Amino acid sequence: MKSFLGQFFSLLLLALFIFLSFSTLMPLVEPSAKVPKTEFSVQRAFKHVKKIAQAPHYVGAEHHSEGRNYIVQQLQVIALSVHTQNGNDINDYVDMSNSKNIITIIKGTQSDDSGA
């Protein structure tokens, strides 16, 4: 009986540690109404993910340019200067594709005198 209780509590303790290790890794999701517009919101960000993920948008796909245009538009909505960079890529199978990178710069709010 003593051995059974020891095994039971060991298993219970192990289950508790496993639960705590996973629960601390999960992001805290606050309702968007509570998160100020100046801070990151998982729910607001996920709306963009849903919009982009409506159709496959890999390089060369029919909807690739729609996804790129949506991202560019959303960056311009928040008053960022955006441009695209064209390039050619060759993968491991020697397939060549024309890729377009989206580039924008967000200026920092503090000066850094470290020279980095």
Image (spheres, rainbow, N blue to C red):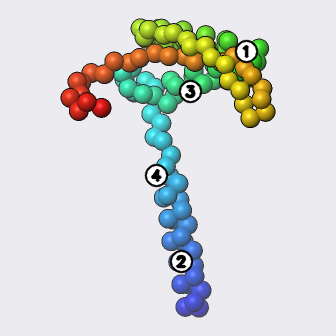
Residue at mark 3: 46
User: Marks 3 and 4, how far apart in space?
Assistant: 21 Å
Q: Which of marks 2 and 1 is nearer the N terminus?
A: 2
Task: Please name which of the two marks, 3 or 2, marks the residue nearer to the observer.
Answer: 3
- Residue 62, image x, y percentages: 77, 14
Where the N terminus falls, by quadrant? bottom right
Where the C terminus falls, by quadrant? top left
> Which dot marks residue 63?
1
Describe the element under mark 4 as helix, strand or loop. loop
Residue at mark 4: 24
User: Marks 1 and 4, how far apart in space?
Assistant: 37 Å
Query: Would you place residue 79 above or below residue 27 in this image?
Result: above
- Residue 50, image x, y percentages: 63, 23
> Which dot marks residue 107?
none
Task: Please name which of the two marks, 1 or 4, marks the residue nearer to the observer.
Answer: 1
Residue at mark 2: 10
Task: Please name which of the two marks, 3 or 1, marks the residue nearer to the observer.
Answer: 1
User: Marks 3 and 1, how far apart in space?
Assistant: 19 Å
Q: In which quarter of the image is residue 47?
A: top right
